[in-house]
Amino acid sequence: MQRNRHRHFRLSDDSGRRQIRMLAGEAALPDDGTRQSWVTVTRTGSFTDPRYGRFAITRDMLLGMVKNFDARTLGVDVFLDVAHEPEKGAAATIKKLAVVGNKLRALVEWTDYGIEAVKTRGLKYLSADFHENFLDNEQGHFHGPLLQGAGLTNRPVIKHLDPVQLSCDAGGDTPVVIHPELARILLSEAKETMNKVLKALLEKLAAKKLSQVALDTVKQLGETQLKDVTDETEAERVCGLLEQAAVQLSEQLAQLPAGHAAPVIQLSVGSSLSPDTINAAVSKVLAEQAQTAKQLAETTDARRKLLSDTIGAAEGLDDGLKKELSERVATLINADWSEDQVRTLAQSQINAGNSIVAARQLSTLGYGPNGTPHIVVPNDGTKKLSDLYRDHLGRTDMAYALHLDPKAKLHPFCARVLSEFDRIHGYQLDAELKVLSQGATDMGSTSLPVGVQREVIREALSDLNVLALVQTLTDFGAQATTQIPYEIRDTSQVINDGVVYEGQPIPLAGVTQAMDMTFITPMKLALSVTNEVLHFTRASAINWDALARNIESNARVLRELVHRRICNELQRASDSYLAVPVANESFTAQLNGAKHTIKTTGFPIVRPFQARDLAGNAVGTAENPITVTLNSAVISQYDGSGKQAAGTYWRVLSYNLGTIQFVTQEGVPVTPANTGTNTISYGMATNVVKFDLDIQGGVTNEIWLNGLVQKIGSRKAMMSTQRYVQPNFLLMSPTLNDTITNAEQFVVERKRDGSNTNSDGDLATIKGVPSFGTNAPGVDMGDERILMGQRGVGAYTVAKPFITGEPIEMTNNGQPIGKKVAYGEEYNAITVPKPVRDRFTSVVVYSATARAAI
């Protein structure tokens, strides 16, 4: 597990300081008489620096900077300076931040000092100065990514950025560059005009009642001749020639013998249309038709022989079964079939034959299943395709971030999910294997998204450590619901220590296997796709580096989504056990302090839950709902969509600390007026024990943290003696893990049996219970919760593996914007059956002083 680091970045090249500085964008001065202009501050990407290694700037980080800027989290205005020397004055004041594509843009108001630095001193570039996770010095809270400022510099680290011009009146001849989207629209309009011209010609010829052959021939010739024409006058000239050719052709075809099949004759504009020419053309076409018919018959026979030979070469099938399998499908094959299609059909018949042989063998062994047994015969093709991918990906710059070891054994759950994926996409996987095995260097004959999607699933599930804590199930036949198995140990009917005398009833006891129904959830994700990762471009070489980045990025997003949902469900299940409903708790007094954040009297609070079907309709009664009444009116929860009506909404900042924040429909914190009744109803978790980090009694921090270890031990003892559960995992954030290792008893000479750290200094076990780390952002546990429980109680069930479809054009109000989006979905269920939620408990680690200050 890695320790959580909160780094401060200054993104320019300065070897004299231990900071990371990377070029963001070229500075731009206003050219319209004002002092304001938009500049690019930084952009997304993954970077390396010899002083700090690899780090990334993500779109979420940019959005976080905008959010903290709007909330004035820094507490002062944000400025541009010169060479990161703010003490010499401000070059500009940042008035507004916005995320545009993959860039962070800023509206700035320039000072004389800044204008002089750019125009006279020639400083043209900006470097961002930001924190990954800003820690304020007043309340000690972390706020996420925050832009502290930016400096003008001429020593960039990141190269190849689009330059931003300082002005628009440089003089000289300016080349006219048409935006690609405008060019596409103009060409589309020209094409539409040509189609109208050709349509008008065909309607005119049809009105003359010319033969259909003549019309078809002229249509085909017209499409060819007008393909590259964009001038309407030229198009009309070509159509005049086509009209003359159509009339002459129709007259000549009328002279063909009765009953003779009319051939399709290829003409060109300006060719001679004499009777001799037409007769020669007809004779040639008839001869070609006879030759084509002969070739079709020979090709059909060859394809059917290939089917018979392929099935005949299969091992493990007797001759009679091979003949039967061939004859069943031979009549389906015609000359249009490719050899690859024939081999695919043959392999399908071979697989069916293997299943028949396997069923016969099971029958001879005495196994007689009811219904039709499902027998899976492994397909070696998908393994070869995966090996081929790993071989190429292993030579890319992203190889270090991927799990490519061919000797590493797949988790059984991962293998089951991939098996279902292979069943659904077997044909496409086989086709991609054939193309890549032939050493193809471009994508001319395959779109190649399916093999990439398979690698995304394998990569995501190969590094999803939280799966060790839950049941991993598959239910590929599930529709709207699925069943989750669980066990109940019941000894309530056993009396007198199990002593039963003669003639007395024997009480029932033991372990009961039960099932809990849960609804399938559609987990959907739309990813913006840039040209760099459009690996299925038909006319370019396969960019395996771009492919590797795409696989790693998609796998990380999928992994984080599943990890967060599993962690949040485990915590919700634990908190909902023995939860106490709190009704109409007043928070009016807190609003008198003019705050936009309030806290509940009791904490932690339980995350609400409402079961829903695939259409999003609520099913049953909500568990532990939160109701906020502000100024005598119930207000809604902020949903983050940005589409809610203007007004005041609430959102939970921390379930662990019971903090609620009021925001606008845009998510901006707001202090509401206090003009009526203000109450909150919620579920308070009692299945917890709390530990206050505030040191008392004059002891050292190391000695005080021994108390936290003792709290964990007391919860383990309670679970064992009162609930007959032996906890076998602890789940917490890397930050909290690091905090516990500072306890005195982890010092080498004072270690206690059953509690230890690993070779990296991270927590390994406490009281014999192994520790696991949360490795996804945004989980409810935060840095305040230690979850303890029994593995295999919760369940992650996959009903349909994650699949990304073909990219589609992105639009804004119906207008294309020159980007594409790939849409993917996975149908799954993540839940803890209600009867076994008592197999979890937790410790809340917090600072009472910090909470009181909220």
Image (tube, rainbow, N blue to C red):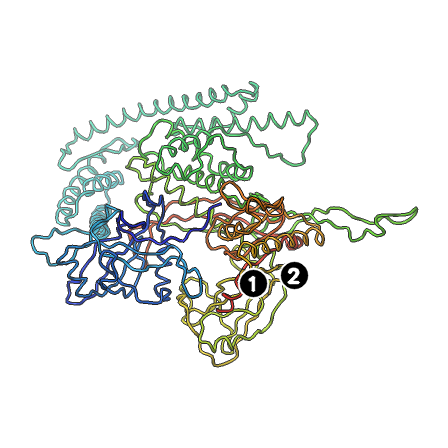
Location of residue 53 in the rendering, given as x and y in whole percent from the top left corner: 35, 43
- In the image: residue 33, left or right of residue 403: left
Mark 2 crowd level (few <14, some 14–19, many ≥20, 10 Å Cα): some
Give the mark toward the camera: 2 or 1: 1
Q: Quadrant of residue 98?
A: bottom left
Mark 1 crowd level (few <14, some 14–19, many ≥20, 10 Å Cα): few
* Residue 521 seen from this side: no
Q: Residue 718 carries which label?
A: none
- Local secondary structure at mark 1: loop
Location of residue 94 in the rendering, given as x and y in whole percent from the top left corner: 27, 64
The amino acid type of the residue labelled 1 equals Gln
Q: In this view, does 846 lie above or below 319?
A: below
The amino acid type of the residue labelled 2 equals Leu
* Residue 789 seen from this side: yes
Q: In this view, does 568 lie above or below 443?
A: below
Which residue does the image show at 46% across and 40% down from the upper left? 459
Residue labelled with disc 1: 696
Near-viewer residue (839 or 425): 839
- Local secondary structure at mark 2: loop
Near-viewer residue (446 or 155): 155
Near-viewer residue (489 or 79): 79
Name, please, the residue furthest toward the bottom: 675
Name, please, the residue furthest toward the right: 502
Q: Earlier in the sequence, mark 2 or mark 1?
A: 2
Location of residue 290 in the rendering, given as x and y in whole percent from the top left corner: 31, 24
- In the image: residue 114, left or right of residue 48: left
Residue labelled with disc 2: 578
Cα–Cα gap, marks 2 and 1 = 30 Å
Which residue does the image show at 58% across and 59% down from the upper left? 691
Location of residue 282 in the rendering, given as x and y in whole percent from the top left corner: 23, 29
- In the image: residue 560, left or right of residue 476: left
